[in-house]
Image: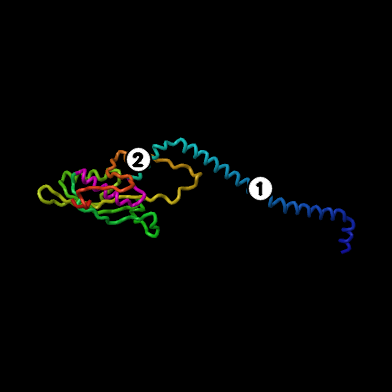
Protein backbone atom coordinates (compact mmCIF):
# COMPACT_ATOMS: atom_id res chain seq x y z
CA UNK A 1 0.00 0.00 0.00
CA UNK A 2 2.88 2.35 0.87
CA UNK A 3 4.51 1.55 -2.44
CA UNK A 4 1.34 2.51 -4.26
CA UNK A 5 1.03 5.78 -2.33
CA UNK A 6 4.69 6.54 -2.98
CA UNK A 7 4.19 5.79 -6.71
CA UNK A 8 1.17 8.08 -6.88
CA UNK A 9 3.03 10.92 -5.13
CA UNK A 10 6.00 10.51 -7.43
CA UNK A 11 4.12 10.16 -10.71
CA UNK A 12 0.95 12.08 -9.82
CA UNK A 13 1.15 14.36 -12.83
CA UNK A 14 1.66 11.49 -15.24
CA UNK A 15 -1.20 9.47 -13.72
CA UNK A 16 -3.63 12.39 -13.91
CA UNK A 17 -2.55 13.19 -17.46
CA UNK A 18 -2.92 9.54 -18.45
CA UNK A 19 -6.42 9.32 -16.97
CA UNK A 20 -7.49 12.50 -18.72
CA UNK A 21 -6.03 11.29 -22.03
CA UNK A 22 -7.75 7.92 -21.66
CA UNK A 23 -11.05 9.61 -20.93
CA UNK A 24 -10.61 11.85 -23.98
CA UNK A 25 -9.78 8.90 -26.25
CA UNK A 26 -12.76 6.96 -24.93
CA UNK A 27 -15.07 9.93 -25.55
CA UNK A 28 -13.70 10.33 -29.07
CA UNK A 29 -14.16 6.63 -29.81
CA UNK A 30 -17.72 6.65 -28.48
CA UNK A 31 -18.51 9.57 -30.77
CA UNK A 32 -16.53 8.47 -33.82
CA UNK A 33 -17.63 4.83 -34.02
CA UNK A 34 -21.34 5.57 -34.53
CA UNK A 35 -20.44 8.35 -36.94
CA UNK A 36 -18.17 5.97 -38.88
CA UNK A 37 -20.98 3.43 -39.08
CA UNK A 38 -23.43 6.06 -40.34
CA UNK A 39 -20.91 7.32 -42.89
CA UNK A 40 -20.24 3.81 -44.15
CA UNK A 41 -23.97 3.18 -44.57
CA UNK A 42 -24.29 6.40 -46.56
CA UNK A 43 -21.38 5.46 -48.82
CA UNK A 44 -22.80 1.96 -49.38
CA UNK A 45 -26.26 3.34 -50.18
CA UNK A 46 -24.78 5.91 -52.54
CA UNK A 47 -22.83 3.23 -54.42
CA UNK A 48 -25.95 1.05 -54.72
CA UNK A 49 -28.03 3.98 -55.96
CA UNK A 50 -25.34 4.88 -58.48
CA UNK A 51 -25.45 1.35 -59.87
CA UNK A 52 -29.28 1.41 -59.98
CA UNK A 53 -29.26 4.76 -61.79
CA UNK A 54 -26.79 3.42 -64.33
CA UNK A 55 -28.99 0.36 -64.92
CA UNK A 56 -32.05 2.59 -65.35
CA UNK A 57 -30.17 4.83 -67.77
CA UNK A 58 -29.13 1.81 -69.83
CA UNK A 59 -32.66 0.42 -69.78
CA UNK A 60 -34.10 3.78 -70.80
CA UNK A 61 -31.76 3.92 -73.80
CA UNK A 62 -32.73 0.38 -74.81
CA UNK A 63 -36.45 1.24 -74.55
CA UNK A 64 -36.01 4.34 -76.70
CA UNK A 65 -34.23 2.26 -79.34
CA UNK A 66 -37.02 -0.32 -79.55
CA UNK A 67 -39.41 -0.41 -82.47
CA UNK A 68 -42.71 0.20 -80.66
CA UNK A 69 -44.83 -0.69 -83.70
CA UNK A 70 -43.03 -4.03 -83.99
CA UNK A 71 -43.57 -4.75 -80.29
CA UNK A 72 -47.30 -4.00 -80.56
CA UNK A 73 -47.52 -6.18 -83.65
CA UNK A 74 -45.77 -9.05 -81.86
CA UNK A 75 -48.08 -8.61 -78.89
CA UNK A 76 -51.13 -8.82 -81.15
CA UNK A 77 -49.87 -12.06 -82.68
CA UNK A 78 -49.20 -13.62 -79.29
CA UNK A 79 -52.35 -12.46 -77.48
CA UNK A 80 -54.62 -13.70 -80.28
CA UNK A 81 -52.84 -17.06 -80.33
CA UNK A 82 -52.74 -17.56 -76.56
CA UNK A 83 -55.09 -15.12 -74.74
CA UNK A 84 -54.54 -14.08 -71.13
CA UNK A 85 -57.90 -15.55 -70.10
CA UNK A 86 -60.01 -18.59 -71.01
CA UNK A 87 -61.70 -16.73 -73.89
CA UNK A 88 -64.11 -19.57 -74.62
CA UNK A 89 -66.01 -17.30 -77.02
CA UNK A 90 -63.03 -16.95 -79.39
CA UNK A 91 -62.45 -20.70 -79.10
CA UNK A 92 -66.01 -21.43 -80.25
CA UNK A 93 -66.03 -18.70 -82.89
CA UNK A 94 -62.75 -19.92 -84.35
CA UNK A 95 -64.00 -23.50 -84.68
CA UNK A 96 -67.36 -22.42 -86.12
CA UNK A 97 -65.76 -20.02 -88.63
CA UNK A 98 -63.19 -22.58 -89.73
CA UNK A 99 -65.92 -25.22 -90.14
CA UNK A 100 -67.86 -22.84 -92.37
CA UNK A 101 -64.76 -22.06 -94.44
CA UNK A 102 -64.01 -25.76 -94.91
CA UNK A 103 -67.62 -26.58 -95.82
CA UNK A 104 -68.24 -28.87 -92.87
CA UNK A 105 -71.19 -28.72 -90.47
CA UNK A 106 -70.53 -28.07 -86.78
CA UNK A 107 -73.03 -30.33 -85.00
CA UNK A 108 -71.97 -29.72 -81.41
CA UNK A 109 -69.39 -27.91 -79.34
CA UNK A 110 -69.16 -28.89 -75.68
CA UNK A 111 -66.66 -27.48 -73.23
CA UNK A 112 -65.06 -30.37 -71.38
CA UNK A 113 -62.58 -28.74 -69.00
CA UNK A 114 -61.46 -25.20 -68.32
CA UNK A 115 -57.98 -24.66 -66.97
CA UNK A 116 -56.95 -22.61 -63.99
CA UNK A 117 -57.45 -18.85 -64.20
CA UNK A 118 -55.33 -16.14 -62.63
CA UNK A 119 -57.86 -15.63 -59.82
CA UNK A 120 -58.27 -19.33 -59.03
CA UNK A 121 -55.18 -19.48 -56.85
CA UNK A 122 -56.61 -22.25 -54.70
CA UNK A 123 -56.70 -24.64 -57.64
CA UNK A 124 -53.72 -26.51 -58.99
CA UNK A 125 -52.61 -26.86 -62.57
CA UNK A 126 -52.32 -30.31 -64.04
CA UNK A 127 -48.88 -31.76 -64.70
CA UNK A 128 -49.38 -31.19 -68.43
CA UNK A 129 -50.28 -27.53 -67.88
CA UNK A 130 -47.21 -27.11 -65.68
CA UNK A 131 -45.08 -28.68 -68.40
CA UNK A 132 -46.55 -26.43 -71.10
CA UNK A 133 -46.44 -23.32 -68.93
CA UNK A 134 -50.02 -22.48 -69.94
CA UNK A 135 -53.56 -23.47 -68.99
CA UNK A 136 -55.82 -25.60 -71.19
CA UNK A 137 -59.45 -25.29 -72.29
CA UNK A 138 -60.74 -28.59 -73.68
CA UNK A 139 -63.82 -29.07 -75.88
CA UNK A 140 -65.55 -31.96 -77.59
CA UNK A 141 -66.50 -31.09 -81.17
CA UNK A 142 -68.72 -32.99 -83.60
CA UNK A 143 -68.48 -32.31 -87.35
CA UNK A 144 -70.30 -33.60 -90.41
CA UNK A 145 -68.94 -33.42 -93.93
CA UNK A 146 -67.15 -35.20 -96.73
CA UNK A 147 -63.87 -36.99 -96.16
CA UNK A 148 -61.96 -34.35 -98.12
CA UNK A 149 -63.54 -31.42 -96.25
CA UNK A 150 -63.03 -33.00 -92.83
CA UNK A 151 -59.43 -33.83 -93.72
CA UNK A 152 -58.91 -30.22 -94.77
CA UNK A 153 -60.39 -29.03 -91.45
CA UNK A 154 -58.11 -31.33 -89.43
CA UNK A 155 -55.04 -30.18 -91.34
CA UNK A 156 -55.86 -26.48 -90.97
CA UNK A 157 -57.06 -26.38 -87.35
CA UNK A 158 -53.49 -26.70 -86.04
CA UNK A 159 -52.17 -23.83 -88.17
CA UNK A 160 -54.41 -20.89 -87.30
CA UNK A 161 -53.75 -17.88 -85.10
CA UNK A 162 -55.86 -19.10 -82.15
CA UNK A 163 -53.59 -22.01 -81.30
CA UNK A 164 -55.54 -25.24 -81.09
CA UNK A 165 -54.42 -28.81 -80.60
CA UNK A 166 -56.17 -32.04 -81.56
CA UNK A 167 -55.98 -34.30 -78.53
CA UNK A 168 -57.80 -37.17 -80.21
CA UNK A 169 -60.41 -37.76 -82.92
CA UNK A 170 -62.68 -40.44 -84.25
CA UNK A 171 -64.25 -40.69 -87.72
CA UNK A 172 -67.35 -42.69 -88.56
CA UNK A 173 -68.90 -43.15 -92.01
CA UNK A 174 -72.48 -42.15 -92.64
CA UNK A 175 -74.77 -42.31 -95.65
CA UNK A 176 -73.22 -41.88 -99.10
CA UNK A 177 -70.07 -39.75 -98.81
CA UNK A 178 -71.05 -38.08 -95.52
CA UNK A 179 -68.87 -38.63 -92.46
CA UNK A 180 -69.02 -37.68 -88.80
CA UNK A 181 -65.88 -36.68 -86.93
CA UNK A 182 -65.66 -36.49 -83.14
CA UNK A 183 -62.72 -34.35 -82.02
CA UNK A 184 -61.31 -33.42 -78.65
CA UNK A 185 -59.80 -29.99 -79.20
CA UNK A 186 -57.63 -28.02 -76.80
CA UNK A 187 -57.03 -24.28 -76.69
CA UNK A 188 -54.56 -22.48 -74.47
CA UNK A 189 -54.43 -19.36 -72.36
CA UNK A 190 -51.81 -17.78 -70.16
CA UNK A 191 -52.73 -15.28 -67.41
CA UNK A 192 -50.62 -12.14 -67.25
CA UNK A 193 -47.83 -12.28 -64.65
CA UNK A 194 -48.68 -10.84 -61.23
CA UNK A 195 -45.35 -8.97 -61.09
CA UNK A 196 -43.08 -7.49 -63.73
CA UNK A 197 -39.88 -7.22 -61.72
CA UNK A 198 -37.92 -4.17 -60.63
CA UNK A 199 -37.49 -1.17 -62.92
CA UNK A 200 -33.74 -1.74 -62.89
CA UNK A 201 -34.00 -5.35 -64.09
CA UNK A 202 -32.57 -5.82 -67.61
CA UNK A 203 -35.00 -6.10 -70.51
CA UNK A 204 -35.68 -9.70 -71.55
CA UNK A 205 -34.60 -10.58 -75.07
CA UNK A 206 -36.10 -13.03 -77.56
CA UNK A 207 -34.25 -16.30 -77.95
CA UNK A 208 -33.72 -17.70 -81.45
CA UNK A 209 -36.46 -20.28 -80.85
CA UNK A 210 -38.86 -17.54 -79.78
CA UNK A 211 -38.02 -15.46 -82.86
CA UNK A 212 -38.63 -18.43 -85.13
CA UNK A 213 -41.91 -19.26 -83.37
CA UNK A 214 -43.07 -15.65 -83.70
CA UNK A 215 -42.20 -15.58 -87.40
CA UNK A 216 -44.15 -18.79 -87.94
CA UNK A 217 -47.07 -17.51 -85.89
CA UNK A 218 -47.27 -14.29 -87.91
CA UNK A 219 -47.95 -16.41 -90.98
CA UNK A 220 -50.95 -18.18 -89.42
CA UNK A 221 -54.34 -16.80 -90.53
CA UNK A 222 -56.65 -15.22 -87.97
CA UNK A 223 -59.86 -17.16 -88.51
CA UNK A 224 -62.17 -15.64 -85.88
CA UNK A 225 -62.93 -11.94 -86.16
CA UNK A 226 -63.13 -10.00 -82.92
CA UNK A 227 -65.61 -7.15 -83.32
CA UNK A 228 -65.08 -3.86 -81.57
CA UNK A 229 -67.76 -2.93 -79.01
CA UNK A 230 -70.36 -0.47 -80.28
CA UNK A 231 -72.61 1.94 -78.47
CA UNK A 232 -76.33 2.34 -78.90
CA UNK A 233 -78.80 -0.27 -80.08
CA UNK A 234 -78.36 -2.43 -83.16
CA UNK A 235 -80.60 -4.93 -84.93
CA UNK A 236 -79.06 -8.15 -86.15
CA UNK A 237 -80.85 -10.46 -88.52
CA UNK A 238 -79.61 -14.01 -88.93
CA UNK A 239 -81.03 -17.18 -90.32
CA UNK A 240 -79.70 -19.22 -87.39
CA UNK A 241 -81.13 -18.86 -83.91
CA UNK A 242 -78.65 -21.36 -82.52
CA UNK A 243 -75.01 -21.12 -83.58
CA UNK A 244 -74.54 -24.86 -83.47
CA UNK A 245 -77.74 -26.04 -85.13
CA UNK A 246 -77.58 -25.81 -88.95
Instruction: Considering the whole magenta stretch, tell me its main secondary structure.
Output: helix
Q: Is residue 69 visible?
A: yes
The boundaries of the magenta stretch are 81-102
Quadrant of the rendering where the N terminus is positioned: bottom right
Residue at image position (16%, 51%) is 180
Q: Quadrant of residue 53?
A: top right
User: Is 175 left, or right, of 11 in this rendering?
Assistant: left
User: Is 33 left, or right, of 86 in this rendering?
Assistant: right
Residue at image position (37%, 42%) is 75
Q: Is residue 182 visible?
A: no
Residue 214, label in figure: 2
Circle 2 SS class: helix
Residue at image position (64%, 48%) is 40
Circle 1 SS class: helix
Residue 39, label in figure: 1
Alpha carbon separation for disc pair 2 and 1: 52 Å
Amino acid sequence: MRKVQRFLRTYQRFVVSGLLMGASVLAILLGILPMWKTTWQKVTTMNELTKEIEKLRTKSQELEALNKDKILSDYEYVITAVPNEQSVSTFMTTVDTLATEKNVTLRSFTIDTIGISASASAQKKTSEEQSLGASIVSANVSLDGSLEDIRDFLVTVGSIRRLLRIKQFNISFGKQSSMTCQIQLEAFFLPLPATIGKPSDPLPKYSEDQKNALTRLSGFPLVSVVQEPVTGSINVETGRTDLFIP
